[in-house]
Amino acid sequence: MGAGFHGGFGETSGSQSNNSMPNHTNASTPREKFVNYSLDSNNANAKGKAEAYEKGLGYTKQNADGLISQIHSAVTTGTVKPYDISQTKYGVKYKYRIPVTGPNGQTKNVIAVYQIDNGNGTPRLITNYLEGK
């Protein structure tokens, strides 16, 4: 079989990928996803994420740009490759494990999941969280 994707996306869970995400240089990493959700301790659906980011790396809504920049750069430059690729009914998801250094000096892995929606070629961040506890 040649390079690239050739079906069987459901079988890739947990597998290592050597492929970059298609169109990764144009990936969208919206700031709003962080300040209105992942780092918003007042958002009942994201309180645990916000606490983990603050305790683990020292990131809050006020200093979110450093976190966003590290994630976006790792994905768009292709320095980090997705470790899991899966097909969903909405599109193809690419899961990244990105080492991020926080303002507290700690380095921890952030899981960032990008998706290329069916009928659209531009990847967009759909979720992110600090790996582990």
Image: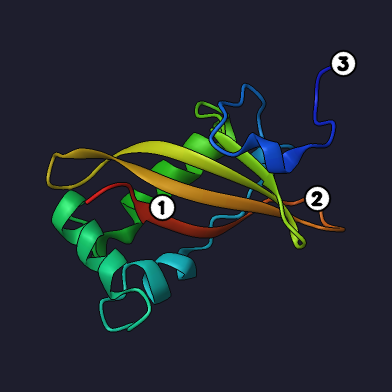
Residue at the (16%, 39%) spot, across then down: 106
Mark 2 residue type: Gly
Across and down, in percent, residue 18 comes to 62, 21
- Residue 9: quarter of image: top right
For marks 3 and 2 on the same chain, the one whose residue lies earlier in the sequence: 3
Residue at the (48%, 35%) spot, across then down: 74
Q: Is residue 7 left or right of residue 99?
A: right
In 3D space, how far apart are the residues under numbered discs 2 and 1 (Cα atoms)? Answer: 21 Å
For marks 2 and 1 on the same chain, the one whose residue lies earlier in the sequence: 1
Residue 61 appears in the figure: no
Mark 1 residue type: Ile
- Check residue 87 in the rendering and tell me which mark sits there, or answer none: none
Crowd tier of the residue under label 3, counting other residues whose Cα lies within 10 Å: few below 14, some 14–19, many 20 or above: few
Q: Is residue 116 left or right of residue 59?
A: right
Mark 3 residue type: Met
Residue placed furthest toward the front: 11
Residue tagged by mark 2?
A: 121
Across and down, in percent, residue 120 comes to 82, 56
For marks 1 and 3 on the same chain, the one whose residue lies earlier in the sequence: 3
Which element is circle 3 on? loop
Q: Nearer the viewer, mark 3 or mark 2?
A: 3
Residue placed furthest toward the top: 1
In 3D space, how far apart are the residues under numbered discs 1 and 3 (Cα atoms)? Answer: 37 Å
Across and down, in percent, residue 34 comes to 41, 65
Height in image: 126 above or below 81? below
Which element is circle 1 on? helix
Which element is circle 2 on? loop
- Check residue 68 in the rendering and tell me which mark sits there, or answer none: 1
Across and down, in percent, residue 71 comes to 44, 44
Residue tagged by mark 3?
A: 1
In 3D space, how far apart are the residues under numbered discs 3 and 2 (Cα atoms)? Answer: 24 Å
Q: Nearer the viewer, residue 10 or 38?
A: 10
